[in-house]
Amino acid sequence: MYRLNDKIKDLKPYDPVEGGYRIHLDANESFLPLPSGILEELSAELPKVSLNRYPDPSARELCQAFAEFYGVPVENVAAGNGSDELITVLFTGFLQRGQAFATVEPDFSMYAFNGYLQEAQHIVISKRKDYSLDIDKIIEICQNNKVKLLIFSNPGNPTSIVCPREEIRRLVRNVDALVVLDEAYMDFSDQSLLPEFQEYDNLLILRTCSKAFGMAGLRLGFAVGPKPLIDAVKAVKSPYNVNVLSQMLGTLVLRHSQALNEAREQILHSLRELVDGLEALREKFPGRFQLLPSATNFVALKMRDGESLYRWLGERGVAIRYTGGLVRITCGTAWENKEVLREMEEYFAASPADGE
Ligand SMILES: *Cc1c(COP(=O)(O)O)cnc(C)c1O
């Protein structure tokens, strides 16, 4: 009988969302559909796509549209089948077996997962109690342990807080490791290192179309960095990683910078609604939760009964995440925000304050 090896025998598929939730605030996607004008352009373009041919392996037009939107040279950009794929590519290509990589915890779970599959040595660096990054500690641990790859998100998932650019600069300058800076949520904040990426030879920045740009279903992610590193990413990735439809539609959407900026404003408006509602809840139920300052499209709540709130909401058809000891709620439509706030109010009213 064939037996799965020890490495994979206990693995479970990623986050199966079971059952029919009526509201999805669990995956930090955009709640906005693509603007109808863009959808019309798409239907006009669709017949021109050669589905019988392989896609452009370097996704040139797509990378060009991305490069123009962010004002970076196209030769410094590589496209992936979501930034998730690029994370896998970085772990398989930039780490040799047994070498050390470091993550800060809590953070996006895919980093540790990829390092595990790569059979690399994982060094976990905890965040401070307030979830900020202790840059001096990270530098020291990376240098003392010959860390080859340091990967973290900024703004952080699931913490929602952003580390100031100046601190990240200091970190990148003071480690020998390749720093993979996952800026999946940086479209909601203003501390990006993208404008100055050329100043570093050990920095790769990841961006995604899944969060601010409403294209999670297309699976589009990008890496930006020094040309030798980007060329290596292109050499390691599978040749036809971004399919023709995603290349075509992604290119089209990224050329609509005004529509993208408007969508971002709408998402930020929704976030403020959710934050205002939570602050009102906090006044009504003092001491029940802490709200971390969000620089993203989601909020992070610190509370001792977070898991029980998570279950309460799930039973009422509202999907959120409970991860890294934090309750994480994506901002949604006005109605979705109202619904989650209403269910939370009922929860706080119904459940005892849990030994406060
Ligand atoms: C959502 C998310 C991603 C995944 O983005 P895709 O481009 O959809 O694969 C990567 N990093 C972080 C921190 C995320 O939260």
Image (cartoon, rainbow, N blue to C red):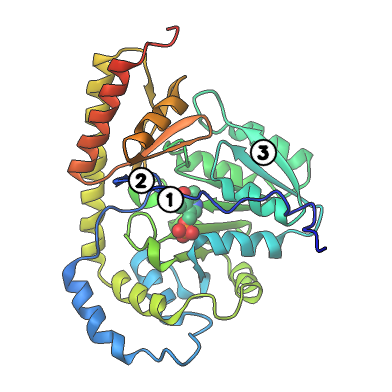
Q: Is residue 288 visible?
A: yes
Confirm or deny contact between disc 2 and disc 1 (CB under 8 A): yes
Residue at coordinates 24% horizontally, 65% vertically from top-left? 34
Label annotation for residue 42: none
| Number of residues whose C-alpha sits closer than 10 Å to that of mark 1, classed few (under 14), some (14–19) or many (20 or more) | many
Q: Position of residue 238 (x, y in %)?
A: 61, 76
| Number of residues whose C-alpha sits closer than 10 Å to that of mark 3, classed few (under 14), some (14–19) or many (20 or more) | many
Q: Find disc 3 in the rendering and name its residue.
A: 139
Q: Nearer the viewer, mark 3 or mark 2?
A: 2
Above or below, 19 relative to 351: below
Relative horizontal placement of residue 104, taking residue 303 as reference (left or right): right
> Tag 3: residue type?
Ile
Above or below, 9 relative to 61: above
Above or below, 306 relative to 97: above
Q: Find disc 2 in the rendering and name its residue.
A: 189
Relative horizontal placement of residue 52, taking residue 258 as reference (left or right): right
Residue at the farthest front position: 1
